[in-house]
Image (cartoon, rainbow, N blue to C red):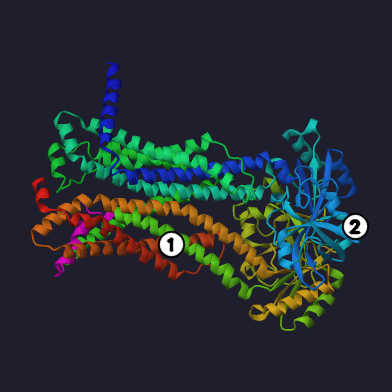
């Protein structure tokens, strides 16, 4: 009794292996689809994990210490410095944006970084000449009346300088003594809009840029003693800092979260790429189902023979299910192997180019996840077509060639398919970084599959009900759409999915390019001017208006502050919505005014009057307030310059962020910061965008007259942002290409699978007098009609998806890009026709006699 299951399993495996002796013909698309999807998921998971491990392993180097305490617009007080010094070695770094000027009048924005003698606590600065052997202090020391600097080569190129040249920063003379090749803590500083200029803190103080209210970030890196460097010791320092100096306003990072924003972006992008890989698997699943169905069609006589000899339906299904799993295993192994080696290949080929710490290894958990995805996908899409063979009698199997029976599989197979699909969906949700997005993806995938199957049925119904045309060719083409064994469902699903994804990518890409390359510069300011001393504000206004009389000047006071509490809850304990979490992650620009700011519209509540002098009030941006769960009347506490200030929310505003004007999440009532050291920020906007000559002249005049004022040219900032967006879109395109390849493979496989039916059709029709030209025309019209019907859905679905991504996730205006959508539609139709005719042409050359003898 106990040996029967084992014997049965052994027999099933032997039969499956014998079936595979005939080769893999008909399963190449199956294997390729599974391999592509598993490759995408394994590669993304392994690459993301290698980045995470690299960030974790080099956390101290990236952060510049075991912990970092950051302050904005002020240095640490003596008591704060003493607190840090008592707990380990301290290194202070000041970062700010400033204007570098040459003797011949050129100027450029730089990201200045002023370091002390202890910098860096971990890692090393590599400069040329000198490498990492020359002490940094000697490169930055004052010699012959000039302070030294190590400079990003981009600045030398931009200003046409060579090492040894001198520039002016503020009121100090700086000699560019070496070219910066490696900066250990570069990632911790985020993305900058200008090249790095590494100087000493003595040089910074000599520039005159350290004015009250200047936008300078002071970061104090702490290296813990060797005997107290555990994570628990590091957390104890953080707890003590918060307890002893609750109003310091520190932004504290530890080595375990050296670059939290980068890590969040990696996780989000990894989730997107994983969903792309899962999409490739789902698209490939259609190929799995097609391959299983058409393989069973070819094996119809074998199945009939097995049943004639006494094989049960369960045995038949088991044999072919094992065969499917074995073939899926080939694709999975290929995908896992390629996915596992990708991080090693990237580190080897591009490790010196990518500014990210990669630590490639074999990651069993990520590979196991990809394996599970592959097995569940093959099971989900193969069970249904395999289950149909269970109850078909021998006569039906032979007769199914010309009159296929339409019946559902047994309930057991339906339940098995549903369970496999549910497991696949559950795995996608559990493994997701943002489970809400994963649930939306699954619901969207189910909806798209359902809609495409409904569209296929609708196309077949219309073709069946349409009046019979006079043209024989057209009548044959229409009949092929709804005849038994028609390719309509397969073509509609595979082509529709691929086209929808392609249109989505094109719409997002085109909208981003339009937004950054065309629309924004036309209405954006020409310049931002930062760090305008409050006492020089009126003189600055008069000067700019005299230099650029046709430009519009807007100037407001600005400070930086961190939200530390809201309606009595600490910021770290708040649970914001994902689209509002950014406002709590660092300090934000704030202002105060008696009038409603330009670019804002009052959405709820009342604005305070011009002569208001009561308790401190604040106006909050509406969407951010809703994301934080705040409403009018709630209190919010903001730390500004080391002082906690609590204000009551008086009103909510909507802000036109796309104008790139001076906009703030938080606007306080006048008098809120009386006596605080404040600098101003201003925008200058030329009508029509302004010419390069007048913008250059204004920037030179301002930087010469006000050397402490920083000018940010908006066009250059937009170019930097556009470069980042372009690289992101390229990454999305490359990843999405996997899904598109899978869709093309499925489409080509489906059309190739119909070759046998086309042979029989062609032979019968040629016997009755049809010419090759008529048949080719009929098939071309058939594929043209199928492609045309499908592209309507693909373009519509892709456009809607693109609109959702641009509007909801990117918060940008959406404009439907007709050209890219139509180009994708035409390409899809041509692809269908070409693939179809390529697969059909050999069938037209078959001799009738051999085929008719085997009917």
- The image shows a total of numbered marks equal to 2
**Residue visible at 11% across and 55% down?**
764
Residue 22 falls left or right of residue 67? left
Q: Position of residue 739 (x, y in %)?
A: 42, 52
Q: Position of residue 781 (x, y in %)?
A: 24, 65
Q: Position of residue 380 (x, y in %)?
A: 35, 41
Mark found first going from the N terminus, 1 or 2: 2
Residue 266 drawn above or below residue 778:
above
| Local SS, label 1 | helix
Q: Position of residue 827 (x, y in %)?
A: 37, 64
Q: Nearer the viewer, residue 365 or 670?
A: 365
- Residues rendered magenta in the picture: 468-489
Q: Which residue is mark 2?
A: 143
Q: Which mark is residue 503?
A: 1
Residue 774 falls left or right of residue 19? left
| Local SS, label 2 | strand
Residue 352 drawn above or below residue 813:
above
Farthest-out residue, top: 1
Q: Which mark is residue 786?
A: none
**Residue visible at 20% across and 58% down?**
480
Report the Cα–Cα distance between label 1 and label 2: 60 Å
- Name the image quarter holding the N terminus: top left
Residue 258 falls left or right of residue 24? right
- Check residue 248 for magenta coloring: no
Residue contact at pointers 1 and 2, CB within 8 angstroms = no
Q: Nearer the viewer, residue 340 or 524?
A: 340
């Amino acid at each position: 009794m106990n040996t029967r299951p084992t014997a049965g399993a052994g027999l099933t495996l032997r039969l499956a292996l014998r079936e595979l002796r005939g080769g893999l013909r008909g399963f190449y698309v199956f294997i390729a689809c599974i391999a592509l999807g598993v490759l995408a998921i394994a590669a993304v998971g392994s690459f993301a994990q290698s980045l995470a491990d690299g960030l974790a392993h080099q956390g101290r180097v990236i952060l510049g210490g075991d912990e970092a305490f950051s302050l904005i617009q002020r240095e640490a007080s003596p008591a704060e410095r003493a607190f840090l010094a008592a707990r380990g070695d301290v290194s202070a770094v000041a970062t700010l944006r400033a204007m570098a000027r040459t003797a011949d009048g050129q100027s450029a924005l730089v990201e200045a970084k002023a370091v002390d003698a202890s910098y860096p606590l971990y890692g090393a600065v590599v400069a040329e000449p000198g490498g990492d052997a020359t002490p940094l202090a000697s490169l930055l020391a004052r010699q012959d009346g000039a302070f030294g600097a190590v400079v990003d080569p981009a600045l030398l190129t931009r200003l046409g300088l060579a090492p040894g040249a001198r520039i002016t920063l503020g009121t100090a003379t700086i000699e560019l003594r070496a070219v910066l090749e490696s900066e250990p803590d570069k990632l911790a500083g985020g993305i900058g809009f200008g090249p790095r200029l590494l100087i000493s803190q003595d040089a910074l103080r000599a520039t005159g840029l350290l004015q009250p209210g200047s936008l300078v970030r002071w970061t104090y890196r702490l290296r813990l003693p060797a005997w107290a460097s555990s994570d628990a010791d590091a957390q104890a320092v953080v707890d003590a800092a918060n307890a002893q100096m609750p109003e310091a306003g520190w932004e504290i990072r530890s080595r375990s979260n050296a670059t939290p924003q980068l890590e969040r972006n990696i996780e989000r992008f990894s989730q997107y790429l994983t969903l792309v890989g899962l999409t490739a698997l789902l698209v490939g699943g259609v190929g799995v189902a097609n391959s299983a169905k058409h393989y069973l069609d070819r094996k119809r006589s074998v199945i009939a023979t097995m049943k004639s000899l006494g094989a049960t339906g369960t045995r038949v299904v088991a044999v072919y299910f094992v065969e499917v799993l074995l073939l899926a295993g080939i694709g999975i192994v290929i995908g896992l192997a390629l996915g596992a080696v990708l991080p090693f290949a990237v580190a080897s080929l591009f490790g010196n180019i990518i500014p990210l710490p990669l630590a490639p290894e074999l990651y069993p958990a990520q590979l196991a996840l990809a394996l599970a995805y592959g097995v569940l996908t093959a099971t989900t899409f193969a069970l249904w077509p395999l289950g149909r063979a269970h109850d078909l009698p021998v006569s039906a199997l032979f007769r199914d060639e010309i009159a296929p029976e339409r019946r559902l599989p047994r309930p057991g197979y339906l339940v098995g398919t549903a369970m496999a699909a549910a497991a696949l969906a559950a795995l996608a949700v559990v493994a997701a970084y943002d489970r809400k997005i994963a649930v939306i993806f699954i619901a969207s995938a189910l909806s798209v599959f359902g809609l495409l199957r409904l569209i296929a049925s609708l196309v077949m119904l219309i073709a069946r009900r349409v009046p019979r045309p006079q043209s024989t060719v057209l009548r044959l083409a229409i009949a092929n759409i709804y005849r038994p064994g028609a390719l309509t469902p397969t073509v509609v699903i595979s082509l529709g999915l691929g086209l929808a994804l392609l249109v989505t990518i094109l719409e997002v890409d085109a909208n981003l390019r339009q937004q950054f390359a065309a629309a924004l510069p036309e209405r954006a300011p020409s310049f931002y001017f930062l760090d305008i001393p409050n006492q020089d504000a009126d003189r600055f206004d008069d000067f700019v208006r005299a230099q650029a009389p046709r430009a519009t000047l807007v100037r407001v006071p600005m400070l930086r502050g961190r939200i530390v509490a809201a309606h009595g809850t600490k910021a770290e304990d708040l649970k914001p919505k994902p689209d509002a979490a950014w406002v709590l992650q660092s300090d934000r620009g704030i202002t105060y005014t008696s009038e409603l700011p330009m670019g804002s519209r009052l959405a709820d509540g009342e604005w305070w009057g011009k002569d208001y002098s009561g308790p401190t009030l604040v106006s909050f941006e509406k969407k951010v307030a809703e994301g934080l769960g705040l409403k009018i009347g709630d209190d919010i506490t903001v730390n500004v310059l080391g002082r906690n200030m609590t204000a009551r929310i008086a009103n909510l505003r909507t802000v036109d962020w796309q104008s790139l004007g001076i906009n703030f999440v938080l606007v306080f009532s006048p008098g809120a910061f009386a006596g605080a050291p404040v600098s101003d920020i201003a925008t200058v906007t030329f009508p029509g965008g302004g010419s390069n000559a007048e913008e250059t002249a204004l920037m030179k005049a301002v930087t010469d007259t006000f050397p402490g004022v920083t000018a940010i040219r908006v066009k250059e900032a937009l170019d930097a942002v556009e470069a980042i967006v372009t690289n992101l879109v390229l990454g999305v395109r490359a990843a999405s290409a996997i899904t598109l390849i899978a869709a093309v493979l499925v489409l080509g496989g489906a059309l190739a699978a119909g070759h046998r039916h086309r042979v029989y059709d062609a032979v019968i029709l040629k016997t009755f007098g049809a010419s090759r030209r008529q048949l080719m025309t009929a098939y071309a019209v058939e594929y043209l009609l199928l492609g045309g019907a499908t592209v309507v859905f693909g373009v519509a679905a892709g456009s809607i998806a693109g609109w959702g991504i641009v509007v909801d996730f990117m918060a940008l205006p959406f404009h439907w890009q007709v050209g890219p959508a139509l180009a994708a539609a035409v390409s899809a139709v041509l692809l269908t026709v070409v693939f179809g005719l390529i697969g059909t042409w050999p069938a037209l050359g078959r001799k009738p006699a051999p085929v008719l003898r085997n009917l």
